[in-house]
Each structure stands twice: as C-alpha cells, then as structure tokens.
C-alpha cells in the first residue's frame, strides 16, 4: 500500500521540479528504491538506452521516459498521415506490422520483431498539432 501512495507523489513532485537535475536524480532514486525498477524520469530527450533498432520519425521529441526495460517516446508530427512514414521506417528495420488503422483524427499501428513490440499511436495534442507516441517493450 505504501508503494502505491509514494510513487504518484514522487512522480508529481519530479514533474513540478523537473528543471533541477539534482532533485531529479534523487526522485529517480526514491522511485527505484520503492518499486525495485530502474526509472528515468520524463524529459524531452530520447531516454538513455532506447533501442537503436527502433527507428523514430524525424521531429521534436515532446516526451521521453524509460521505465524498467520499456520506453515511451512522443514525437511531434504533422498529422495522422505520418503513420505511412513510420510504418515504412519500422518495416524497413525488420518489424512486422500487426493490427492498426487511420482516421482523420489519428492513427494506431502495432509492430513487432524478434526482440521488441512497438505500439505507435498518433493523436491530436490540443491545438498545437499531433504527437506520434511510441510504446516500446522487450519481448523477452
């Protein structure tokens, strides 16, 4: 029960104090100690250790986080049509496309190879544009 209360509080604190790397390092340590899982707090860079075999579409990284052996990265894109380029990149890197689809407002596509599953979801980010969110998880 203690872990459930501490983790959201620590994450909220880290987001509030996100500009201070010393505090960020301390917060990461508390989360890791509490959960027993290695954590890299959210930022606007590609998280350390992100697998090189998972290509990302060119664009500004709006959010990046590593949690354990998984990753979540959001990249700013022009719209749902960016899924065509993302699919081409991932399939060119040896990933197989699974279920997915595109609408006028967004797109979703799942991919996998022998090592990773990748779920890409493109959604509208308020009035500021679109984000392509990559959720990457190891299969082993």
Image: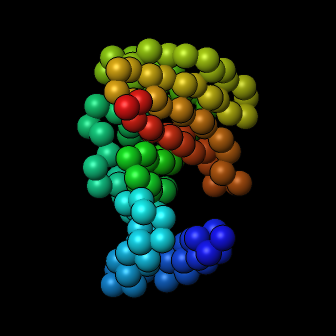
Say which of 129 and 100 sits in front. Answer: 100
Q: Nearer the viewer, residue 34 or 133?
A: 34
| Coloring scheme used | rainbow
Q: Is residue 93 left or right of residue 17?
A: left
* Rendering coords of residue 64 (x, y %): 44, 55
Front position in the image: 112 or 62 = 112
Report how many numbered discs are placed on residues in the image.
0
- Let me know if residue 139 appears in the view: yes
- Residue 135 image position (x, y, % from top left): 50, 40
Q: Is residue 44 visible?
A: no
Is residue 113 depicted above or below 74 in this figure?
above
Q: Residue at x 50, y 77 (%)?
A: 14
Estimate the x, y position of residue 77 in percent, counting from the top left: 52, 41
Q: Position of residue 67 (x, y in %)?
A: 44, 54
Residue 99 sits in quarter: top right
Above or below, 115 against 41 in this view is above
The image quarter containing residue 140 is top left
Q: Which residue is outermost to the front?
A: 1
Quadrant of the snapshot with the N terminus: bottom right
In the rendered view, tell whether residue 96 sits above or below residue 27. Answer: above
Residue at 66% across, 51% down: 125
Q: Residue at x 64, y 29 (%)?
A: 107
């Amino acid at each position: 029960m203690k872990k459930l209360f501490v983790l959201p509080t620590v994450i909220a604190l880290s987001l509030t104090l996100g500009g201070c790397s010393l505090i960020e390092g301390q917060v990461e340590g508390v989360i890791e100690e509490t959960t027993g899982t290695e954590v890299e707090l959210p930022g606007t860079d590609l998280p350390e250790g992100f697998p090189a075999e998972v290509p990302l579409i060119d664009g500004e990284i709006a959010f990046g986080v590593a949690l354990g052996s998984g990753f979540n990265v959001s990249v700013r894109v022009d719209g749902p049509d960016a899924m065509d380029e993302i699919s081409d990149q991932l399939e060119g890197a040896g990933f197989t496309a699974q279920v997915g689809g595109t609408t006028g407002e967004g797109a979703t596509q799942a991919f996998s190879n022998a090592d990773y599953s990748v779920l890409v979801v493109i959604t509208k980010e308020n009035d500021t544009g679109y984000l392509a969110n990559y959720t990457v998880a190891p299969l082993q």
